[in-house]
Image (cartoon, rainbow, N blue to C red):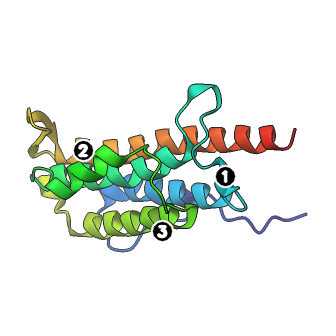
């Protein structure tokens, strides 16, 4: 029986407007977005902040991924974090009244779209330019920051998917 499921994003070809060297970053971000939406279909809102075995909650990962993308792309632009970004960072993982799964997914979607749009504007000749990270301005490069944005997103996506699966299975017991 043939499956209608699409191949992974990286197997669908190049994304229009994204420089060749940044295609893997875009592919990883879009793959994470798809997998998160797929796994969180029908996820019970009541489990959003659960921490099985003390691991990070699904809500934390859904707050953290967009925040990290925003921060890493800011550093790649050669800018320091704003007060608003620092405030967002301070709220990651904290249960906030009125925060719903749908709003967390929308925030993720907006940030992935913004990140993809930003990738389209990056001059490949700047990829090895040094960029400082954090208050200490630890040296990295534009490419290092963008690669880390993809790698970090996928790391948290994997943790999120496993945690969601465990919580769904636990609920079914």
Circle 1 SS class: helix
State left or right for residue 138 relative to residue 110: left
Q: Are marks 1 and 3 in contact (CB under 8 Å)?
A: no
Q: Quadrant of residue 73?
A: bottom left
Question: Whole-percent x and y of residue 107?
Answer: 42, 65
Q: Identify the residue position indicated by label 1 in the image.
A: 46
Which residue occupies the extreme front position in the image? 97
Q: CA distance from mark 1 to mark 2?
A: 35 Å
Q: Identify the residue position indicated by label 2 in the image.
A: 145
Q: What label sits on residue 97 in the rendered view?
A: none
- Between 164 and 139, the one lying in front of the other is 164
Question: Whole-percent x and y of residue 166?
Answer: 72, 37
Decide: few, some or many residues near mark 1? Use Cα within 10 Å; few <14, some 14-19, many ≥20. few
Circle 3 SS class: helix
Which tag is nearer the camera, tag 1 or tag 2? Answer: 1
- Between 24 and 151, the one lying in front of the other is 151
- Against 34, is 148 above or below? above
Question: Whole-percent x and y of residue 56?
Answer: 52, 35
- Between 152 and 68, the one lying in front of the other is 68
- Nearer the N terminus, badge 1 or badge 2? 1
Q: Name which residue lies at 65% across and 57% down.
A: 45
- Nearer the N terminus, badge 1 or badge 3? 1
- Nearer the N terminus, badge 3 or badge 2? 3
Q: Identify the residue position indicated by label 3 in the image.
A: 106
């Amino acid at each position: 029986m043939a499956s209608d499921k699409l191949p992974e994003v990286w197997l669908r070809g190049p994304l229009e407007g994204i420089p060749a060297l940044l295609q893997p970053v875009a592919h990883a971000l879009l793959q994470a977005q798809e997998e998160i939406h797929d796994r969180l279909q029908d996820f019970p809102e009541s489990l959003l902040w659960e921490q099985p075995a003390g691991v990070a909650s699904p809500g934390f990962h859904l707050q953290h991924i967009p925040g990290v993308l925003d921060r890493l792309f800011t550093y790649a632009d050669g800018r320091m974090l704003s007060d608003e970004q620092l405030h967002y960072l301070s709220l990651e993982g904290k249960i906030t009244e009125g925060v719903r799964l749908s709003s967390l997914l929308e925030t993720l979607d907006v940030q992935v779209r913004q990140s993809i749009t930003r990738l389209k504007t990056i001059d490949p000749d700047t990829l090895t330019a040094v960029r400082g990270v954090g208050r200490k301005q630890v040296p990295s490069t534009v490419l290092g920051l963008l690669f880390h944005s993809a790698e970090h997103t996928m790391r948290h996506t994997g943790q999120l998917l496993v945690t969601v699966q465990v919580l769904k299975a636990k609920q079914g017991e």
